[in-house]
Structures are given as structure tokens and as C-alpha cells.
Image (cartoon, rainbow, N blue to C red):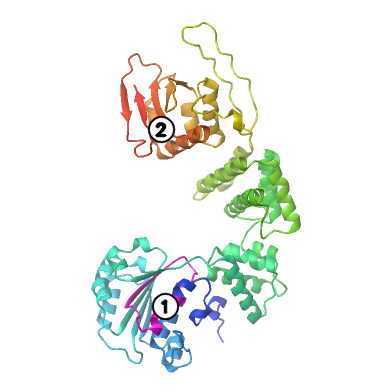
Amino acid sequence: MAYTALYRKFRPLKFEDMVGQEHITKTLKNQIMAERVGHAYLFNGGRGTGKTTTAKILARAVNCLNPQNGEPCNECEICKEILSGSLTDVVEMDAASNNSVDDIRAIRDEVNFLPTKAKYRVYIIDEVHMLSTGAFNALLKTLEEPPEHVKFILATTEPQKLPATILSRCQRFDYKKINDENVVKRLKIICAESNIKITDEALKTIAVLSEGAMRDAISILERCGQESADEITVDLVKDLVGLPSLQYVHKVAKAILENDEMVALQAIDDVINDGKDLYNYLWEVIKYVKDILVYKSTQKLNLYSADELKAIQDLAEKAEKTRLLEIIYQLSELENRIKNSTQKTILFQAGILKICMKPIIPMAQPQIVKGQQNIVQPQPRRDTVSPVPEQKRPTAQNVQKTEDWQQIVENLKKSGKIRLYTCLVNTTVDKLNDQTWEVVFTNGLTDFNKRILEEVNNRNDLIKAIAMATGKEINIRLRDGKAKKAESTTQTSAFDGLGIDINIID
């Protein structure tokens, strides 16, 4: 007898067997019992959430000879033939490989014929967003006014790719990601019926790795069951999916928080030598730092043993929440950079080293006060990553000194906004009031500086930095410190619609 994959073997046969989609199955059962089944449905949701399973159950339920409370009996002749795939009245089509106009025209010609055995001819079109434009146009009229004996069930993961004319002709149901609790509940049933021994921690880990997709969870479970005849453990699960052990993740996270570059590099070398994927490793580090932040905020965490929780507690006591958030953002940016790179190892090592390095606040440049001979003394060189104390944070009223503005600019550097920091590092603040700051480019306002400030990401980062420092929105004017004649022009294209006015004075 041919082997059947677990996700097919344990595919739910009734609506009541499905988990996590009760808001959909309840509505469909009510429609079937009231005999008010629509002519076209659109099932939308992520992979492995039950779209195709629902379509198969619905196709049987509307044709079942002995339906029970909106459920198919799965015992009558029609149900059995649909389950075996021998009934020609229920047609399943994969639009990813059958997306041409001719494929849809074949359906359009078939719908005019009455079903051979069943009450309804049902067409299940999976991945419907893959249909070509011509195929969608060919489907429109039939989908809008099909014969009474025809039902359409469309399934997709990307409804935004469907024409509005298709969407408006269907009853749409949106599938949720299945929560970890429901995934574990279903996996326990499968393990019991398949004689698979597994720890509760391993089940929880599989549920987290599945990211709400039941099919993915069952597939991971199947791989683990094939690998070991003994009890499945967390380490086995992580090893099979290519995730590094927690000791590697903890080691690099601890090194980052302690600014220990050598230990961080050693942890990376260990992961590389162990043959683990760096992208998966980085994902685990991001998740681990996030968990440290969650523990620091709530004193609660799941999926960790007592010893692992103690290690997380020790790290949480060493770091401020702002520092943990900063690390998460920097690691996420690193993840985006290495995603499509051919030099993942080099970028990964350089990126981790950058995060580990302590930022050095540059010495403030001497500023000559107009009309006076005395010079403001430069600020002493500091080496710290601590946030500005709350009572000393610049506000809209006291950001008048050069060093206060430089602290805001320095915060941009700490958060990794190097281009924006470079653009503003030699600027000063002048003519400041409660609503408006004038940023003076003492070395001249160049086209490059203007271009930097017009970029959306830089624009948002500057707005955020100012809001963090002042607690309110501030209007900003930019002035060329070298210009002899100041002629103000309002820059609206870059900051349009953001509640912040930037005037550039050339």
C-alpha cells in the first residue's frame, strides 16, 4: 500500500474537525442547513490554514445524500466517490499550472451540462490569483450568473491580486493563522493515533515554528517521527529544521549586550562550523532578544526551561528596554541586508560587530558666539551607550545650546541612522522658539543634504528623533550658513502631509 503523508491522512473530513476557523465553519453550516448556499465563494488566508480542506468538505456537504446538521455524512455513495476522487462532478484545478484562457473556457463550456450523479457540479480553483488577465475575463460572466447546478469555490493566499470584478462576485471568507494552542491540540491527536512519542516542549516548539500553518506543523512532526523511533525532543526538532541550539543564540545575544566583539565572533564561527544556516540563526537571535524584552516587561515567558529562563533574566537585568529595542531594529535591518546577498557570512559578521561596538560621541566643535571673542569650550569625549536621563532630555524650550542639538543628532547615530547623522553632524540650531527650530548648515546646505532629507526613511527618522526629544511636533527650517542673502523657499514635496514644515533657505 502506498504511503500517505500525515497531513493528507489526517485532513479533517467534517467542519467540526477543523480548528481555529470556527467563524467560517459555523457560517457555512448554517447556510447548508438553511439551503442558502451561495454560487461563488472566495477562501483567503495563509498557507496551511484550511482553505482547501474547507472547500472539499463544502463540496461534499452540498451534495451529500444524508447531511447531518450541515455536515457531510461521508458514508453515502456521493461522499465516498468525492473522497476517492472518482466523481467527475467535483473538479479541483490548480490555477498555478492551469492559468490560461483555454483552461477557463473549458470550464465555461462544461457548466452548461447537468451533473452526472451529484446535485451540484462544484469547481474548486486553488491559487486563483495565478490566473492570467484573459482567464479572469473569461471567468467573469460565468462566475456572475452560473447555472443553478454549479458552485464555484476559489482559494488564494493573495486576494489583492484578484480583479475587483471577481472579488465582488464572491462571498469572501478570511482565514486566521491557527494559534499555537490549537496546533498543539491537533498534533497531540495525530501523535496518539500514529503512536508517536514526543515531549510537550517539542510540540510547543513545532507549533511556534509552523507560524500558524497546520500543514507545516504536521510536516515537521512527520519528519521528526521518521528520524527517531524514540521520544521526539526539542533538540531533535531544532536540529531537523536547521535551527541552532539555544546556547549559540544566548552566547551572541550576551556578547552584544556586553559589547564583547571577540565572544560574538566566536559564537558566529561556532554556528558556521556546525553547518547551520546564518539566516535562520539571525532569526533566532532576533526572537531571543525580543523574548528578553518581553520578560523584562512582563516577567513571563513560555517555551523555556528553568535554567534558560534564569539566563534570560540575567540578560534582562543588564539592559534597558530602549537598548533592547535598538538591538532588535538593528538586527532586523541586518536580516534585510543579507537576505539576497551572495556574501552572507561577511555581512553577518560585520553587522554583528557593528552592533557590538560602543558608539563614540565625537567631541563638540568649538562655536564662536557672534559679537563676542570668547569661545564655547568643547564638550569632553564620552564613551557610553546609556540613554539621556529623563530629567536632562532636550525640550522645545531648552534646545538652544549647540550640545543639546548635537545630543539629538548623536541619538540618530546610536540608532544606526548613519546617513542622516552625517548630514546633520555639523549643523547648529538658531532662532528657536516653541514651534520652530532653524537648523543652520554652517558648511553650506548642499544638494546632497537636501536629497538626504527628502528621502522618506530619513524624513521619518528625523521626525521620530525630534518627537522623542521634545514630546511634540516641531516645525523645522533649514538655512545655508554660508549664504550671503537668505531667500526663503518652502520645501513641500519631501514633508508633505506629515505635519512638519521644512523651509530651505538658500
| Along the viewing direction, whichever of 366 and 139 lies nearer the viewer | 366
Could you say whether the residue bearing mark 2 is in a helix, strand or loop?
A: helix
Q: Residue 472: x percent and y percent?
A: 47, 34
Looking at this view, name the residue that lies furthest to the right.
307
- Whether residue 276 is situated above or below residue 454 in the rendered picture: below
Q: In which quarter of the image is the N terminus?
A: bottom right
The amino acid sitting under disc 2 is Leu
N-terminal label among 1 and 2: 1
Which residues make up the magenta segment?
A: 26-55
Q: Residue 453 carries which label?
A: 2
Could you say whether the residue bearing mark 1 is in a helix, strand or loop?
A: helix
Locate residue 109 relative to residue 363 in the image: left or right: left
Q: Residue 25: x percent and y percent?
A: 46, 76
Looking at this view, name the residue that lies furthest to the top.
373
Q: Residue 249: x percent and y percent?
A: 67, 51
Looking at this view, name the residue that lies furthest to the bottom.
77
Query: Which residue was labeled with disc 1?
Result: 28
- Whether residue 399 is situated above or below residue 75 in the rendered picture: above
The amino acid sitting under disc 1 is Leu
